[in-house]
Amino acid sequence: MIFKSFLVEQNINLIAEKNLILFYGENLGLKNDFKKLIQYNAPENKIMNFTQEEIIRNQERFLSEISNLSLFEKKKIYYINECNDKILEFIKENERIINGKLIYLFSNILDKRSKLRNHFEKLKNIAIIPCYADNEITIRKIILNKLRDFKGLSTENVNLIIDNCNFDRLKLNNELSKIITCFENKNIENNLLEALLDYKVNDDFNLLKNEALSGEKIKTNRLLSDTIIDPDKNVYYLAIINQSLKKISDTYKLSEQISVDEAINFIRPPIFWKEKPILKKQLLKWNSKKIRQVLEATYNLEVEIKSNVQTNKTLLIKKLLVDICELANAS
């Protein structure tokens, strides 16, 4: 039986009578929020974490674990992580033993052909909750709800937080925790918020990265001189580059089936409005072959940086950006 995630977030009692529930989708932050919500509503219960592989490899041990609960033990909640269709046979074969136990399965993306997904969607005695990527509306609601008691929460502040988390709920929750801890007086100051989010550093590098991916040679060279590259953030910089490349790659593939504008609007997680013209410009410069070349280069660079502490990390990151800019303009 399918339940909408936002309805369950508002009222966890909607699934109170379901003992076997599957959460699936790309939104790791939302799935983590559900784990916290489940624990919050059952603080007396003990949480037991397993992976699918652990259970399949040691089926008898897991069945014994859920079957032999003594009268003096706390009631247990079982989280089974990293699930896919392989777990379905185990569930069907042990339905009698599993029945009545609090078991929550967590999966990544499951397409419509997934046997596990279809099984949970069809049966009314169990539940399935899709955890799709957040959009600007849901992210904004989370911020406004978490910081509703804070003074000085302007639209500019909210946009700053949205921009910084890039629609990633997991990152958003981390940022909100920092904000709540930092502003104990519940009075948000814009300059302190920017410093807390390290916005200037992130914003400067994002600008440099975007110009390089757009093939803007003159602007890239100028920004390379002006931008501070923190050597302790090299892996973060590579992750930011890879994230942008994935966005370009996913949109490029979609644009082969629909128009570029439609692809940009359709891509998930959604593109922040001010990034759309930048992405559209970058799509003119890249194809699958060139994207693979850069991804390979970033991987090799990360390996080199991690394995050689004497490496001039700042110089290597700058060289990578120059190479990206040149490749963007290559035919």
Image: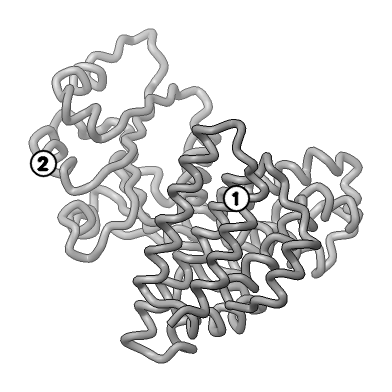
In the depicted view, which residue is nearer to us: 200 or 185?
200
Q: Which amino acid does the dot numbered 1 rest on?
A: Leu
Q: In terms of image quadrants, where is residue 74?
A: top left
Q: Which amino acid does the dot numbered 2 rest on?
A: Glu
Q: Position of residue 165 (x, y in %)?
A: 64, 57
Q: What is the secondary structure assignment of the residue under circle 1?
A: helix
In the depicted view, which residue is nearer to us: 279 or 57?
279
Quadrant position of the C terminus in the picture? bottom left
The residue to which callout 2 is attached is 89
Q: Position of residue 317 (x, y in %)?
A: 61, 53
Query: Label 1, label 2: how many angstroms apart (C-alpha)?
Result: 49 Å
Identify which residue is drawn at 13% across, 36% down: 90
Identify which residue is drawn at 68% across, 42% down: 231
Which circle, 1 or 2, is nearer the viewer? 1
Q: Kindly identify which numbered label has been placed on residue 298.
A: none
Q: In terms of image quadrants, where is residue 46?
A: top left
Q: Is residue 2 left or right of residue 208?
A: left
The residue to which callout 1 is attached is 316
Q: Position of residue 226 (x, y in %)?
A: 80, 62
Q: Is residue 224 left or right of residue 79?
A: right
Identify which residue is drawn at 36% across, 89% down: 258
